[in-house]
Image (tube, rainbow, N blue to C red):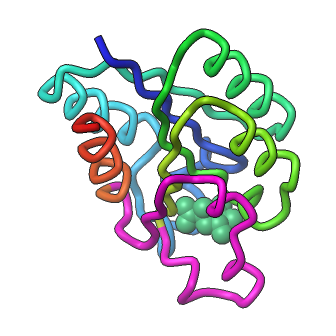
């Protein structure tokens, strides 16, 4: 069965509590369940990972890549705008990533307009809420 990694970065463990006017009232658990239900219909297996620590995310991506995972969805959250290390990790691994943002980063503060990680990814979906993850999953499952 095709395996797809779902990586969520810093502060995304607080979905549902964190700035609900921007990120909505649903939790990370809700997102996980929604994606698992979609994955079931698509016949793919998801590997979920969330961390608030840049190095842990990098370790996980390297480990997944080395274990043969080829596809992934990543919301690097604030690391999007600041992490050269994560950008280099994505660029240097064998996983094809779609970058997802719940909010539209281009409608928000100027400092969010630049994604360091996006150029290392296959594509970017921003501003569609949790549906962005589902769209990314549909795309990756078809590859
Ligand atoms: C985010 C957007 C980022 O700018 C922000 O730092 C996040 C979440 C999003 O999903 O909209 O933590 O990646």
Q: Relative to residue 129, is residue 71 drawn left or right?
A: right
What residue appears at the point 47 percent right and 21 percent down from the top-left corner? 47
- Residue 118 on the magenta span: yes
**Dividing the picture into quarters, in which one does residue 41 lie?**
top left
> At x 72% / y 48%, what residue is drawn?
10
Rendered image quadrant of residue 62: top right
Q: Quadrant of ligand 1?
A: bottom right
State the residue at coordinates (24%, 28%).
Answer: 39
Q: Residue furthest left?
A: 41
Q: Left or right: where does residue 10 sit relative to residue 141? A: right
Q: Which residues are magenta?
A: 103-130
Q: Quadrant of the C terminus?
A: top left
Would residue 64 appear left or right of 135 to someone viewing this image? Answer: right
Above or below, comparing residue 117 to residue 42 in the picture: below
Point out residue 42 in the picture as x, y percentages from the top left corner: 16, 28
* Percent position of residue 66, x then y: 67, 14
């Amino acid at each position: 069965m095709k395996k797809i990694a779902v990586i969520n970065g810093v502060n995304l463990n607080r979905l549902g509590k964190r700035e609900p006017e921007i990120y909505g009232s649903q939790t990370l658990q809700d997102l996980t369940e929604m994606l698992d239900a979609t994955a079931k219909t698509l016949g793919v297996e998801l590997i979920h990972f969330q961390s608030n620590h840049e190095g842990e995310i990098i370790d996980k991506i390297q480990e997944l890549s080395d274990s043969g995972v080829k596809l992934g969805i990543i919301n690097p959250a604030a690391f999007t705008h600041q992490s050269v290390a994560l950008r280099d990790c994505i660029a240097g691994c064998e996983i094809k990533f779609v970058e997802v943002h719940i909010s539209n980063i281009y409608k928000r503060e100027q400092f969010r307009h630049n994604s360091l990680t996006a150029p290392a990814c296959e594509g970017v979906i921003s501003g569609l809420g949790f549906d962005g993850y589902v769209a990314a999953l549909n795309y990756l499952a078809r590859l």
